[in-house]
Amino acid sequence: MDNYQQQDLVIRNGHIVTMDAEGRRFQSADISIDKGVITGIGAALAVKGEVEIDAKGNAVLPGLINCHTHETLLRGLTEDLPLMRWLDEICFPKDRAFQAEHQRAAALMAQLELIRGGTTTFIDIFRYPDEAAAVAEVSGLRAIFSPQLIDEPAGAGETLESTVAFIEKWNHRVPGRIFTWFGPHAPYSCKKETFLKIVELAEFYDVGIHTHLAESYNEVEQFIAQYGMTSTNFLEELGVLSPRLLVAHGVHLNAQEIQLLARRDVAVAYNPTSNMKLASGVAPIPELIEAGVRVGLGTDSNLSNNNLDLFEEMRVGATLQKLWRKDAQALPCEQMLRMATSDAAACLGLQDKVGSLEVGKSADIIIVDLHAPHMWPVLPEPSSNIIEQLVYSASAGDVLTTIVDGEILMRDREFYTLDEDEIENVVHEAALHLIHVSGLESLRNGRKG
Ligand SMILES: [Zn+2]
C-alpha cells in the first residue's frame, strides 16, 4: 500500500493553460479531479487516479463556453440570403413546422459536435427545450436552455406558458449542470407585456434572460421608425437591462447604448461568423470591453455559421476586428481565449464554477492535440506560444478529450456518452422529414443552379 491519495481522475503531463486571473501556465504538469471537482494542479502530483489520462505534452485547458447558439437541424439547406429574408422565408416556416422529434435530432447533432470540438458549456435559445434538455441529461454537457419565445409571427416559437412549464420542470432537475433561462427572441418579435412579465418571472425564479439585440442595420432602422427609440433604450424602459441579461450580437450599438449596457451590467455574446455570413456588420467589441461590458464568444446556430467550432470563432473574431479597424493589435489572442473561457463563464453567471482551471472549480477540461504539424512549433516556457497556437492555429478537430464535471464525454476522439452512428441516422431522417413538412422541398427544387 502506498500512501498516495486516491482520486477519481488524474490527467498527467499536460501543457496546462489555466486561464485563471494570474494567467498561470504549467509545463508537463498534472491535474487531479475528485467528485467532479479539481483537487490539484502541479508537477508530479502525489495522487493516484482511478482513471489516469496521459496528456502526452498536449494542451490542457478549460472547456470552451459557447455564449450563443440555437440547436437547429437544417444546416446548409438554404444559403446566401439577407437576414430578414432568411428569417421570413426559411426560419419562420421551418420553425412553425418544427416538432419535438426534430428538436431531439438537432440537439443530438449539436451536442455531439460541441463535445467533439471541446465545448463543455453552451446556452441554447430554441424550440422544444424539454427534448434538448433530455439530450443534455445524457450527453453530460453543461447547458443553459432559454426557450426561444416569439409573439410575432405567432406559432414560430415558444410561449410564456411553455417556458414557465419548462422552468418548473427542469430548474432543479440536474443541479449545477442544466440551467433554465428565459429566451425572448428579440425586442421586435416579442410584446412589451411579454418582456414585463419575463422581468418579473426571471427574478422570481432567479434565472437569466437571453435575447437578440441590434443584430442587423435594417432591424435597427425599422425598430426606431416603429418605436421612436433604439431597442436598447426600449429594453431599458421595460426594466429588462440588468446583470441577468445576456444579449446576442449588439452589432449596431451607438456610444450611448454601449454606456447603458455597461451601467446595467448586461453581458454581450459576440458572434463574428454569423455577423459576417448574414452581412449584419461588425460588433463594437473593443468599445464594449473598454466600457466594462462582459463579452463572451458564441457561434450562433449551424444555419448561420455553419459549425459550432469555437476555435474557428476565436480566430475569425480576432481577424475580423483587425481588418475592420485596420489595427493588427485589436482583440489580441489572449483576450479571445478569455472570451471563450473565463469571460464567457462570467457572461453566463458561472464564473465561480467554470471558465478556468483552479482547485475547487468544476472539472470541465479539454485536451488539445499539439502533436500535429499545423500546431508547430510548440515552444517551452517561459517563451511559450501555446495561446497563440490555440487561438490562431487550432480547430475543433484538434480536440482529443472532453471532460465535464470530471466525467469523460470523449477520450482520444471516442465518444463516451453519445452514439455517433445512431445520431447520424436520426439526424438525416429527421432533416428530410422537416424539409417535407415545412414545404421547403419546393424551395429547394425551384433553386437556380
Ligand atoms: Zn441567434
Image: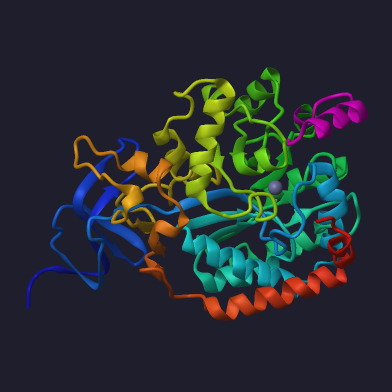
In the image, residue 117 sits, relative to residue 316, either above or below, namely below
Nearest the viewer among 6 and 370 is 370
Counting every numbered tag in the picture gives 0
Q: Quadrant of residue 186?
A: top right
The secondary structure that most of the magenta stretch takes on is helix
Q: Which stretch did the figure color magenta?
A: 215-232
Where is residue 55 shown, x and y percent of the image?
A: 26, 61
Protein image colouring: rainbow
Residue at 32%, 46% (x, y): give it: 18
Quarter in which the N terminus is drawn: bottom left
In the image, residue 73 sits, relative to residue 261, either above or below, namely below
Whether residue 251 is visible, yes or no, is yes
Where is residue 327 shown, x and y percent of the image?
A: 50, 21
Q: Residue furthest front?
A: 449
Residue at 56%, 32% (x, y): give it: 320
Nearest the viewer among 306 and 199 is 306
Q: Is residue 382 magenta?
A: no
Q: Quadrant of residue 302?
A: bottom right
Horizontal side of 56 relative to 1 (left or right) equals right
Quarter in which the C terminus is drawn: bottom right
In the image, residue 394 sits, relative to residue 13, either above or below, namely above
In the image, residue 287 sits, relative to residue 446, either above or below, namely above
Q: Is residue 220 magenta?
A: yes
Whether residue 19 is visible, yes or no, is no
Horizontal side of 332 relative to 23 (left or right) equals right
Residue at 56%, 71% (x, y): give it: 137
Q: Quadrant of residue 75?
A: bottom right
Where is residue 383 shown, x and y percent of the image?
A: 22, 35
Horizontal side of 129 relative to 443 (left or right) equals left
Nearest the viewer among 46 and 437 is 437
